[in-house]
Amino acid sequence: MDIEQSVDGGVAVLSPSGRLNMVAAPQLKKTVDASVADGLARIVVDLSGVEFIDSSGLGALIGGLKTARQASGDLRIAGAGEQVRTVLGLTNLDRILKPYADVTEARHGW
Amino acid sequence: MADRTTHRHTQHEAQTTSGRGKILALRVVAVLSLAAGTWYVFWRWVWSVNWDNWWIAVPLVVAETYALIDGYLFAITIWRLKRRGQAPPPPEDATVDVFITTYNEPVDLVMTTALAAKAIDHPHETYILDDGNRPEMRAAADAAGIGYLTRGRDWEGHTRHAKAGNLNNAMFETYGEFLLILDADQIPKPEILDRTLGWFRDPDMALVQTPQWFSNVTESDPLGSQAPLFYGPIQQGKDGWNAAFFCGSNAVIRREALMRLGIQEYVAEVDAAVRKALRTSGRILDRSRRQMRKVDPTAAAAVAEVRAAVDLALQRLDAGDPVADVTYDVQETVRAASRSVVSDDLAEIRADLASIGVDLGEDVGIETDPRTGIPLVEDQILDELTTRDYSPLGALDAVGRIMRAVDVTRSDEAQPVMPMATVSVTEDMATCMRLHAAGWKSAYHHEILATGLAPEDLGTMLKQRLRWAQGTLQVLLRENPLTKKGLKAGQRLMYFATMWSYLAGFSALAFLFAPIFYLLFGALPVHAWGLTFVTFFTPYFLLNQLLFLIVGYGVKTWRGHQYSLAMFPVWIKACVTAAANVWFGRELGFIVTPKVSVGGRRRFPVRLVWPQLTVLVLLVASVVVGVVKLWTGSALTVIGVGVNTAWVAYDIIVLSVIIQAGLYRGPGSEDRSEKVEATV
């Protein structure tokens, strides 16, 4: 899986594409960790390129959220497609993490 | 030898599809037995209880009722006995991680299992999950080209959750679609995956459990290690209700099922903990604001600001706003308010900080239950905090700490997502019940595909059984299967049946002491030990025996029967300690096993089984006294002494297993029993 990275006004935007499943999850988590280590603790994960996510993918998002929060930062998700929203609902994770429409909306309030 | 013949037997059974006749016979005998039992117990309650001696009469009739309910649950269990036969071929391209969990077992023992695991036919990755973090274990794994995982730095200073924590840690380091879980001593056969993976063609299948069979057990098995009734009719029966149990080892799990469970639990835990902390923060802030309104207006304003944010946060949560956003905003408000107070008076703050530093630890109000690792916002601590006389910044700082502690990060735990349940020391049962409640399926595949090592001495065995019983009862008390959301009626009963069976210790007391009291003191629990009793009791007893004869055809069920009575002190201890643990937060406690002398000479472990020995002595003495009394013509009747002597004889035969067990010396060496202690 490819993860595109960009930095915009102190916010790191990570854009994985393809399948965010058990094979790709550790890679996403490592990318988040690296961003926080570089001092970019405010992170938006742009899921618009993700066609499939499983619970391991969600686990990586939660792990990333923890890393960011521990550095007084935050992690938000944006651009979730239908399959991603379904899985978020199935696990109730949308009770914790709000799927923002896009990166701009996700950055609101930072 | 026993191992091999049984293997053939189960394989043969797995391949036959017949057995309709046996099921029918089982059902007929079960119905007859329960009818006779119900009639008998009804007669006992309504006509035969001797209320003059209620102190023994009532316990006895309650114990008999308990046994009858146990009979009903057993009948329901075997009613839909499911023989699965062979699995379809494995799903195409299934990826598998084999996990071998170890803590302190000898490296050789672990490597024997690991090499056998590496040689499994189906493509897979093999990992040793070493909770002992031993360099020599790592070296051996590396040399054999086997994966080696230990806990990372995240776990420092956190509850480790034993085996559940070990597995949870490994889940985030690996990525196979299916997980084969093996205890360090469970040597797998090469075909284990090819034989079981096929059940996962059902997309709802979460778990396939295979039997646990022990190779170091003699034919007579005095410690009752083999559990042929459980790894057979009982599991097959539970399977019929889609409630086959996960037993911690020799099982294949679908990662997605476990991970989804972990996410769902994470959401539930975080939501509850955040609400609780917000409410407590509100109380702290109210007090603080009242106290400083006149003293320090600036700080009072800051506190009011945070107080408003807390209220808003609770409202937003009720309105369905995501917890991450809500907590982030509160944290931001607390940070800003703290800064405004800080800049206001630096000197005062230094004093504040010093006093806080003395009074408060790092994790105010949030503790992890040391036995189960459940994150707890301790009411006592939180209440104490709210009554304390805090200075303005003190209040803000306390809130800040609480907010950090119950943030969406679950900072009280090493990792936010814990797929394997940690509410009980038997994480397997708790996890399995949650999987079933979430709508997943499980399967029991009745074919021995791994063989392990059982405890070889009484002390270790008792310790292990106590642990199982405690864990099962923890699950009952924390997540009652009768009320847990999501379970089907049959599943509720299957979990409850196992939990119910662990209450046997109390009924055993009545069954053991009723004849003693009669023979020693003439205390009659029933109106008469006459022919009426015999005619009511005999059909029930015989039909019940017949039922077990059919269910247990070809396997030995007698040891299990003996131990359900003979281990009464263990069962009672488990009930008392599990209740004290769940309700009052006490330690679970354990059995202290006697030290073994260097030469290997062990004395009979009187200290472990003194209650049973005492009862045995009383049983024998009571018969002697009863016969003497009869002979000297006191109040006892011939039929009364006859019935009670037969009863005593049965009790003695059943209890005697504990003496055999105490004298038993396993064929293995010391390091083997060391292994078993680690896995319990």
Image (cartoon, rainbow, N blue to C red):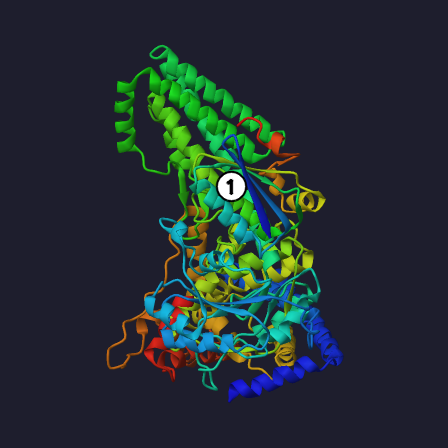
Please tell me whether residue B220 is drawn above or below residue B329 in the rendered image.
below
Query: Does residue B106 appear to the left or right of B171 in the view shown?
Result: left
Quick check: can you spot residue B537?
no
Q: Position of residue B320 (x, y in %)?
A: 63, 32
Q: Position of residue B287 (x, y in %)?
A: 40, 21
> Considering depth in this image, is B302 or B227 the residue closer to the camera?
B302
> Under tag 1, what secondary structure?
helix
Quick check: can you spot residue A45?
yes
Decide: few, some or many residues near mark 1? Use Cα within 10 Å; few <14, some 14-19, many ≥20: many
Q: Residue at x 55, y 26 (%)?
A: A109
Q: Position of residue B328 (x, y in %)?
A: 51, 31
Q: How many marks overall?
A: 1
Q: Position of residue B211 (x, y in %)?
A: 56, 74
Q: Quadrant of the C terminus of chain B?
A: bottom left
Residue linked to disc 1: A65
Q: Residue at x 36, y 68 (%)?
A: B104
Q: Residue at x 43, y 55 (%)?
A: B161
> Considering depth in this image, is A106 or B387 the residue closer to the camera?
A106
Q: Quadrant of residue B670?
A: bottom left
> Considering depth in this image, is A26 or B21 the residue closer to the camera?
A26
Please tell me whether residue B650 is drawn above or below residue B362 in the rendered image.
below
Q: Given the image, on which type of amino acid does mark 1 rest?
A: Leu
* Chain letter of disc 1 in the image: A
> Considering depth in this image, is B566 or A54 the residue closer to the camera?
A54
Query: Does residue B583 appear to the left or right of A100 in the view shown?
Result: left
Query: Does residue B133 appear to the left or right of B650 in the view shown?
Result: left
Please tell me whether residue B502 is drawn above or below residue B476 in the rendered image.
below
